[in-house]
Amino acid sequence: MIRKESENLPSCDYLKRLRNGKMDVASRDEVLDWIAKESKSWMMQLLAVACLSIAAKMAETDVPLSLDLQTGDSKYVFEGRTIQRMKLLVLTTLKWRMQAVTPFSFMDYYLTKINSDRIASCSSIVKCTELILSTLKGINFIEFKPSEIAAAAVAISVAVETEVVDIEKAI
């Protein structure tokens, strides 16, 4: 996994171009805000259903129907062809590379190791997830590998659980 990690890293000069103003940081932030906008909740739900469908196809032998993936508090119900188009958009955007290495790829491993090979608590997983997601907006985190971000998130979440550090100051 460490070897594959480098395949998904941005180019060496990406952070430098962001910091030097050769790339518009405000535009990057604008895009992240736009993606997370509440008014586009249908888009996020469609993306979530499409990604869940793709993930199920990679992990399950008995793949659920698209309609079955839209249960619970689903605000919108999408047609199969709409989900199919979103899946193709996701796969095309990823250039059909389905095993991108992200901090989440390392999180479970680190949590298990730090807990003496026991399954991590839900609160640890939630804290780690929140910490990892909080790194998305800051450009300074781009210089770190996904494995490093995951290791830091796990270390901070464990420190918070043992009340050694304030999570807001740690970020």
Image (tube, rainbow, N blue to C red):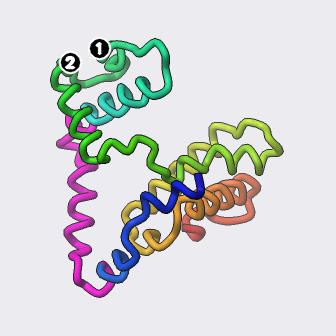
Instruction: Residue under label 1, please give it.
Output: 67
Q: Nearer the viewer, residue 127 or 93?
A: 93
Q: As rendered, which of 124 and 7 lies closer to the eye?
A: 7
Q: Give the range drawn in magenta.
A: 18-44
Residue under the point 47% across and 73% down: 143
Q: Residue at x 36, y 83 (%)?
A: 16
Mark 1 and mark 2 residues within 8 Å of each other at the beta carbon: yes
Q: Which residue lies furthest to the bottom in this view?
A: 20
Residue 155 position, x and y percent, is 68, 60
Answer with the quarter of the image where residue 126 lies: top right
Q: Earlier in the sequence, mark 1 or mark 2?
A: 1
Mark 2 = which residue? 80
Dot 1 alpha-carbon crowd within 10 angstroms: few under 14, some 14 to 19, many 20 or more? few
Look at 34% across and 75% down and name the residue there: 14
User: How many numbered circles are shown?
Assistant: 2
154 up-or-down from 22: above or below = above
What separation in Å lies between label 1 and label 2 (alpha carbons)? 8 Å
Q: In the figure, is residue 94 to the left or right of 9?
A: left
Q: Give the residue at x 52% y 54%.
A: 4
